[in-house]
């Protein structure tokens, strides 16, 4: 990803956009198309989340893979950067502050960006074993997120998957010919998420009360599952992958509900929220795109000065 050194720093623009996923890119394009001056802040690569989605079947425009869509999002921003109205800053936003006449974004490296309004579209971040109480991972046990796992990593192996979140279904559909045995350990409360994978021959479902992971000599892992009735079972897995769900990736300064999500109605008028960060439901690419565009139009029509 390229960035313009110092762009936007200290110099007020019409709109700041934090996060360059589908929501942030849509907000930035909508604003730049309306001749607003825009600064986009992205901590990783443009469209980094969608780039890891193997197969898409619900995004209008003919997109069938995440990497193609991510490349198109980067191309969209590049086109608008050419107009001189849009700048891209590589950095991690740590805080958002709204004042009567402006909004500010603080970056981890100390830079301060100022705009008439800000769209925050930082999405969600995946939970790790440290975030959930039902998994106990011994020091040294190595886990990685399922949704980023390459098929070569698991092919022909015994794989323990911690959690039954939806990326499992997407991963299995994206790699129909990868042969591996997936032991999916999940709390009973996640049972409803398993319907879409229950018929896949590669999957074994294990509803558990608790699970413990320990590293074995040679690199494999011993996974001990404890059931509600007090019984337990063990399996040795070549690979342990996490699929535990996600939590909102909100920078400080946003108003959040009990689950950490940031609904629009809780925010200062100069702070617009778009995409997955708004709530646990409706987390889809097409929704994020529409939402980002709407967020950019709000200050435009509201004519914040
Ligand atoms: C495995 C998987 C499969 C999926 N499959 C589908 C599917 O088939 N169809 C579908 O419609 N949806 C799917 N989704 C959901 C979809 O990816 C999201 O709904 C969509 O990406 C949300 O867009 P967004 O712009 O709100 O957030 P994101 O795409 O998450 O973008 C947020 C951006 O903000 C950046 N960021 C985060 N924090 C900061 C910070 N502090 N400072 C600066 N930048 C920051 C991130 O790096 C990221 O680029 C899937 C998700 C996963 C995980």
Image (cartoon, helix red, strand yellow):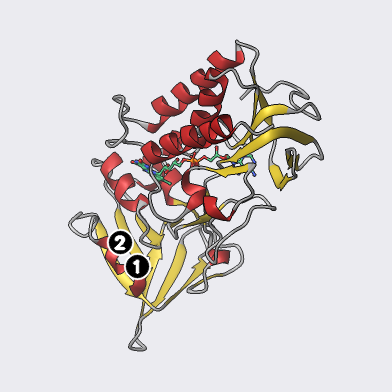
Q: Residue at x 24, y 40 (%)?
A: 177
Camera-nearest residue between 293 and 221: 293
Kindly indicate the quadrant of the structure image that contains residue 55: top left
The percent position of residue 195, horizontal first and vertical second, equals: 23, 60
Mark 2, secondary structure of its residue: helix
Q: Residue at x 69, y 33 (%)?
A: 116
Point out the residue furthest to the top here. 82
Q: Which mark is residue 193?
A: 2
The percent position of residue 152, horizontal first and vertical second, equals: 38, 40
Question: Which residue is labeled 1 in the image?
Answer: 190
Q: Is residue 45 something that shows in the picture?
A: yes
Q: Is residue 21 something that shows in the picture?
A: no
- At label 2, counting other C-alpha atoms closer than 10 Å, the crowd grade (few under 14, some 14-19, many 20 or more) is some
Q: Which mark is residue 74?
A: none
The percent position of residue 221, horizontal first and vertical second, equals: 47, 64
Q: Are marks 2 and 1 in contact (CB under 8 Å)?
A: yes
Mark 1, secondary structure of its residue: helix
For residue 88, above or below residue 279: above
Q: Ligand 1: does it lie within 8 Å of the C-beta at label 1? A: no
Of the 4 image quadrants, the one containing the N terminus is top right
Q: Ligand 1: does it lie within 8 Å of the C-beta at label 2? A: no
- At label 1, counting other C-alpha atoms closer than 10 Å, the crowd grade (few under 14, some 14-19, many 20 or more) is some
Q: Is residue 186 left or right of residue 87?
A: left
Q: Residue at x 32, y 33 (%)?
A: 59
Camera-nearest residue between 263 and 18: 263
Point out the residue furthest to the bottom here. 230
For residue 272, above or below residue 71: below
Mark 2 to mark 1 CA distance (whole Å) = 6 Å
């Amino acid at each position: 990803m390229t960035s313009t050194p110092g762009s936007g720093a200290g110099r007020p623009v019409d709109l700041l956009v934090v996060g360059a996923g589908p929501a942030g890119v849509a907000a930035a394009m909508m604003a730049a198309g309306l001749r607003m001056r825009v600064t986009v802040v992205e901590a990783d690569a443009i469209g980094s989340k969608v780039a890891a989605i193997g197969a898409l079947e619900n995004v209008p425009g003919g997109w069938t893979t995440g990497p193609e869509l991510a490349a198109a999002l980067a191309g969209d921003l590049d086109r608008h950067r050419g107009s001189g109205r849009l700048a891209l800053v590589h950095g991690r936003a740590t805080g958002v502050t709204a004042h009567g006449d402006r909004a500010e974004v603080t970056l981890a490296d100390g830079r301060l960006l100022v705009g008439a309004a800000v769209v925050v579209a930082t999405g969600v971040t995946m939970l790790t074993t440290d975030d959930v109480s039902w998994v106990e991972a011994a020091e040294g046990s190595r886990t990685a997120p399922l949704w980023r796992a390459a098929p070569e990593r698991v092919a022909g192996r015994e794989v323990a998957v911690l959690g039954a979140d939806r990326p499992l279904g997407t991963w299995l559909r994206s790699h129909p010919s990868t042969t591996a045995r997936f032991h999916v350990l999940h709390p009973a409360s996640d049972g409803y998420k398993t319907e879409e994978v229950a018929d896949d021959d590669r999957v074994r479902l294990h509803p558990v009360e608790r699970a413990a992971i320990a590293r074995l000599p040679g690199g494999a892992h011993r996974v001990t599952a404890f059931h509600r009735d007090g019984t337990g079972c063990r399996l040795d897995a070549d690979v342990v992958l996490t699929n535990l769900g996600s939590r909102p990736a909100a920078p400080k300064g946003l108003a959040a509900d009990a689950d950490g999500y940031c609904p629009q109605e809780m925010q200062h008028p100069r702070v617009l929220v778009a995409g997955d960060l708004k709530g646990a439901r409706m987390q889809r690419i097409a929704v994020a795109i529409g939402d980002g565009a709407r967020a950019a139009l709000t200050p435009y029509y509201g004519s914040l000065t």
